[in-house]
Amino acid sequence: MEPKLPDTHQTSMLTFAKDLPNICSLVGLLCAVVSMYFSILGNFPAAMIGMLWAVFFDWGDGIIARKIKNRTDQQRAFGGMLDSLIDIISFGICPAVLLLSYGEFGWLFLPGAFIIVATSAIRLSYFDIFGLVDNSTYVGLALDNNVLILALVFLLDGLISQAVFSIVLYATLMILAGFNLSSIRTPKFAGRWFYILTAYVLILTIIYGWIMWHRGN
């Protein structure tokens, strides 16, 4: 049997990677990787900043994609798949690493980390099949909203003991996982909400930056 020749008409992988919305998605992935790096080092304010910017770029890639009118069906399909895979890292694995690291990698935190990752996998698989209820409504809480809520809760770190806050953090993430998989209807934030998100991310970046500076001194 003759070997199968490569399809010379098939678009290369790097061609898709150079698509502007996908570049934005990959920058968000970089933010998530940086967040996990700082989580492992125990620099949690820096980890939260990375996670917040991962949300920013996750929202940004969709806005850019909608503004580009000449994208092919292949580009749109690739972008949707890439976005979903990055979401499981940014909003599943990344918070799980944060929880494990804050719990000093104790075995009691391992089930929680698994639940976070499993929840993100189930939710994203469901969304890839069924999508939105309508143009502006999700079933369950979207995963990126977890980070926006977590960023506020994490401001309690340092204000209460580490032992107590580890329980608060664990409980918060488990409650959010329950909402992610629930049947409640939640709005899809779009349009002008992006400006609100931008302000939110910038404000919390400044706050967490100040916390890092204060602890460093």
Image: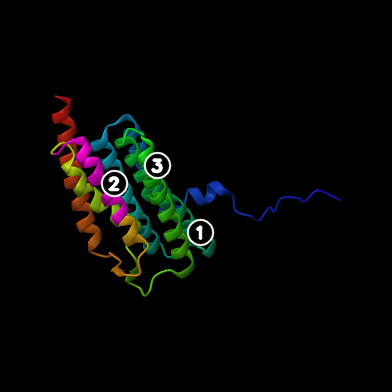
Q: Amino acid at mark 3?
A: Leu
- Which kind of residue does numbered mark 1 sit on? Gln
Is 93 or 6 nearer to us in this picture? 93
Amino acid type, label 2: Tyr
Q: Is 206 displayed left or right of 144 in the figure?
A: left
> In terms of depth relative to the viewer, which is nearer, 70 or 97?
97
Residue 82 visible to the viewer: yes
For label 2, the residue is: 170
From the image, tell me which residue sits under label 1. 75
CB atoms of marks 2 and 1 within 8 Å: no
Q: Which mark is residue 110?
A: 3
Residue 195: x, y in percent? 21, 58
- C-alpha gap between disc 3 and disc 2: 11 Å
Which segment is the magenta one? 160-175
Nearest to viewer (mark 3 / mark 1): 3
- Image: 32 above or below 141: above
| Residue at figure coordinates x 84%, y 50% from the top left | 2
Mark 2 Cα shell of 10 Å, populated few (<14), some (14-19), many (≥20): some
